[in-house]
Amino acid sequence: DIYAVYSKSIAKEDIHVYSIDEVFMDVTNYLNLYRNKDGKPFSPRELAIKMVKDVYTTTGITATAGIGTNLYLAKIALDITAKHSPDFIGILDEDSYKKLLWQHKPLTDFWRVGKGIAKRLADIGVFTMEDIAKTPEDKLYNMFGVDAELLIDHAWGRESTTMADIKNYK
């Protein structure tokens, strides 16, 4: 039912079902389709508010939204900041991520940082995303191998995978 609500505003090609209760959407090309009361194109927040309200009206379920300049930041905005926002919408770009979340603890609140990774990092005195970003990369590669690349990118708020990459994956 919730997916049907999203499908009223966004084409299925621009939605990726991530789990039973989460989707990723690339709404970039939809913002100009919707207009606010001043006749201006919707901002990402305005479109999210529209869909969150529609989900509630249709299903009675309160939805949350994470808006980001990449998939990782959208996920972190959903997981960490939206829960503390009065409208249940979190927004992050690379700068706000560093400002708001570089010192956030525990590291296990971040996508793809489990207890094992957090413990290995704590063993070398690394407790925050800022700590990861400032740790010599060779040290992280020695500890985590190729998986260090994702950890480093995420520490800086970077994510190279796009919705097009997901849709084109075979």
Image (cartoon, rainbow, N blue to C red):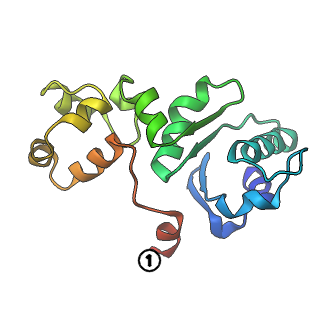
Residue at image point 39% right, 59% down? 160
Mark 1 surroundings within 10 Å by alpha-carbon count, few (fewer than 14), some (14 through 19), many (20 or more): few
Residue at image point 81% right, 38% down? 56
Residue at image point 48% right, 34% down? 96
- The image shows residue 114 at horizontal and vertical percentages of 32, 36
Taking 90 as reference, is 161 above or below it?
below
Work out whether residue 19 can be spotted: yes
Question: Where does label 1 land, which residue?
Answer: 170
Taking 170 as reference, is 85 above or below it?
above
Question: Which picture quadrant has residue 102?
Answer: top left
**Amino acid type indicated by mark 1:** Lys
Residue at image point 77% right, 50% down? 42
- The image shows residue 154 at horizontal and vertical percentages of 35, 45
Say which quadrant the C terminus sits in. bottom left
Image position of 60 (left or right of 104): right
Of residue 67 and residue 142, the one placed in the foreground of this image is 67
Element type where label 1 sits in the image: loop
Of residue 91 and residue 80, the one placed in the foreground of this image is 91
Question: Which picture quadrant has residue 83?
Answer: top right
- The image shows residue 10 at horizontal and vertical percentages of 73, 61
